[in-house]
Image (spheres, rainbow, N blue to C red):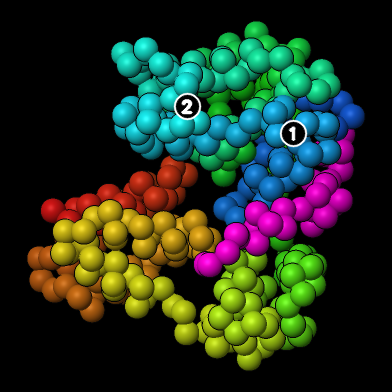
Amino acid sequence: MDGPLWTDLHAPDHSELPQSEVRDHLERAVSEPMNLVVFGPRGVGKTAAVRALARETHADPDNDFVVINVADFFNRTKTEIKNDERFGGFLQGRSSLSKRDMISHVLKEQASYRPVSGDFRTILLDNAEAIREDFQQALRRVMERHYEATQFVIATRQPSKLIPPIESRCFPIAMRAPTHAETVEVLERIVSREGVEYDDDGLEYVAGYGDGNLRKAILSAQTAAEDAGAVTMDAAYDALGDIGMRDRLESILATADDGEFEDARGGLDELIYDEGYDGEEILSELLVAARGRYSGDALARVHQLAGEIEFELTQGTSDRVHLGRLLAELNR
């Protein structure tokens, strides 16, 4: 997409969150700060809801709200972590630390800072399905030590992976997939703010295309607006109706076969992060694309890898890492 993503430009305020039960729980957390576990499927707005909470709670959210993406640690090498400008300053002279100790150190440092406004800061641990049990024990100790001045929020697709001492210290907030009507309402608010032409059929089509993934629906509406200048039925169908993933995945497979792994993974990142596709969706379409490209032992190997990756995806860890592994195997 050419400009800033609509999911960032039109991040909802607390009052605009589509699920009333989530609004009620977060309102309680504003008046009575507490640690939270926010959980639900991909793309339902967990991170957006926590950001809305932070804006409602803190007079200076830019300084008193910190986001730590767990996947940025556990799905990357130590060198990549140290070279990340968000973390490098905390890790100067600590090259011997394990990845677990790296994130523990960053977390301790962040939790020890005094709030700029108000009485406490909020730290969001996002994509916490990648969180390992050894780090959870360290997290528990940090939560115990800094409970007076730090609110911890854990966002995850798999709360069952949290150890009991963490669960017992957090109030759970379940987020379901938005209804079709809720998705249409969100889309109408965004396209109206953008001043983009739309009609009811167009919004209905895009909401259905999102299929319960609010992020995917919003980015699909942006795609239609950028491609056709409108989110009408005709514009949405022209922009989205022929965008299946298959052609793009065929190109990604070809790129991986040519030894250009980084380019292939870049195409994968666009599908996951820019367009909100679920890892299992991508894997299913990738197999269809593979059957048109490979045969014999090569195709059997792809199916074997896909079976392993499908199991890994159900465990709730990073879609990008596991799908990237398949591309890396093809690259070899």
Position of residue 242 measured from the top left corner of the image (x, y, whole percent): 47, 84
Name which residue type carries label 2. Phe
Name which residue type carries label 1. Pro
Q: Quadrant of residue 18?
A: bottom right
Residue drawn at x 29%, y 73% as measured from the top left? 250
Above or below: residue 192 compared with residue 40? below
Position of residue 219 measured from the top left corner of the image (x, y, whole percent): 60, 66
Residues in magenta, as a range: 1-29
Label number found at residue 262: none
Q: Quadrant of residue 154?
A: top right
Distance of label 2 from label 1 (alpha carbons): 19 Å
Tell me if mark 1 has few (under 14), some (14-19) or many (20+) residues whose alpha carbon lies within 10 angstroms of its own: many
307 to the left or right of 188:
left
Q: Is residue 24 magenta?
A: yes
Tell me if mark 2 has few (under 14), some (14-19) or many (20+) residues whose alpha carbon lies within 10 angstroms of its own: some
Give the residue pinned by disc 2: 87
Position of residue 226 measured from the top left corner of the image (x, y, whole percent): 59, 76
Q: Is residue 281 magenta?
A: no
Position of residue 2 measured from the top left corner of the image (x, y, whole percent): 53, 67
Query: Regarding mark 2 in the picture, which secondary structure is present there?
Result: loop
Residue drawn at x 64%, y 73% as measured from the top left? 221
